[in-house]
Amino acid sequence: MVGGKVAKRLELTDGRSRVSLAPDMGGGIAGMWTKDGVPVLRPLVAGVGPFGLASNVLVPFSNRISGGGFTFEGAHNVVPLNLEGQKFPIHGDGFQKPWAVTNQTSINAEIYLSDGGMGPWAYEARQRFALENGRLTVTLSMTNTGPRLPFGGGFHPWFPRLADTRLRFAAHSVWLEDADHLPTEKIALADNPDWDVGTSGALPQGLINNAFVGWDGRAGFDQPSLGITVDLCAQAPLDTAIVYSPDAQADFFCFEPVSHAVDAHNQPEQPGLAVLETGETLTLEMQIGWRNYENPA
């Protein structure tokens, strides 16, 4: 249903791509396919919950916040745990709440979250989806309805991982992480080519779960077995890309355009976070499209 009510699925199609939206599942994307049914995003995995979606929205922050919260302008802000099995609060609360549908056509949709709130944050958010020539644009806007606080966020798309999947993107540095998935050291990719997966193209055989900073906002994912190349583009301030895949046996990888690195709330000067006064809005945008794969050889 539309008109401000929660819908289980919305379908967008423009004759070149088809997109399934899941407003009831945290305002996420349930799937994106070419006109021939080839998956551009990993389709919804039933029974897994929000992380079984093809893409999640991250608001009002991305990834983990350590230490039970953060200090801002001399005041400590407690951020509660929000996901079973996690040691730290993760990805905000937008991906865990139903969003209302406020508008839909065959190629556009808008959904709205009126009661965003987690720990010290209070906000409302909108997502706008537009499908044109097979390319999906997702625009997220969050408006602070509470006190002055740092905000951030982004998107968490999941892509098929096959034996011949290759990544292409450019960044300056990467954060290493500890066993709790918190950042430990930022290293320059120019000095550590083994970490430059965006140039080498190959995902590692083991776990990767790292934030690449100084990302230029463009990425390409070659999927020869599927016959397509996926192009992802993100607008500033989404200049960090988190790459995640458990290992070579996993059937997915994530490439997450976000506005700040992991645990930025507890880093000096809180890099990448946007301080919003009451009533101010932060807008984030990404595009995902596809084209026929052409062998570079």
Image: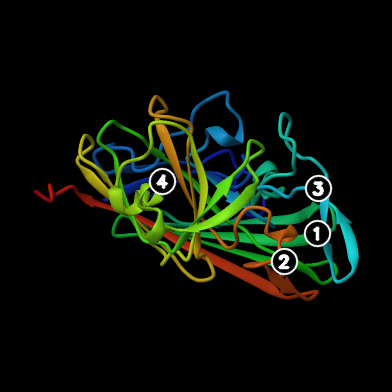
**Rendering coords of residue 199 (x, y %):** 30, 54
Question: Looking at the image, is mark 1 or mark 3 earlier in the sequence?
Answer: 3
Question: Is residue 14 among what the camera can see?
Answer: no
Query: Alpha carbon of mark 2 to alpha carbon of mark 3: how far?
Result: 15 Å
Q: Is residue 238 left or right of residue 182?
A: left
Q: Which of labels 2 and 4 is toward the front?
A: 2
What is the secondary structure assignment of the residue under circle 3? Answer: loop
Residue that carries the numbered disc 4 in the rendered image: 19
Is label 2 or label 1 in front?
2
Identify residue for label 1: 121
Q: Picture coordinates of residue 76 (x, y %)?
A: 89, 60
Residue at left 25%, top 49%? 229
Instruction: Name the residue rendered at 83%, 44% in the picture.
Output: 80
> How far across and how far down the image is residue 141, in percent?
62, 65
Q: Residue 67 carries which label?
A: 3
Q: Name the residue under label 2.
A: 268
Mark closer to the chain start, 2 or 3: 3
Q: For residue 219, which quarter of the picture? A: bottom left
Along the horizontal axis of the image, is 73 left or right of 188? Answer: right
Calculate the distance from the C-alpha at mark 1 to the C-alpha at mark 4: 31 Å
**How far is mark 2 from mark 1, CA to CA?**
20 Å
Q: What residue type is labelled 4?
A: Val
The reply to whether dot 2 and dot 4 touch (C-beta < 8 Å) is no
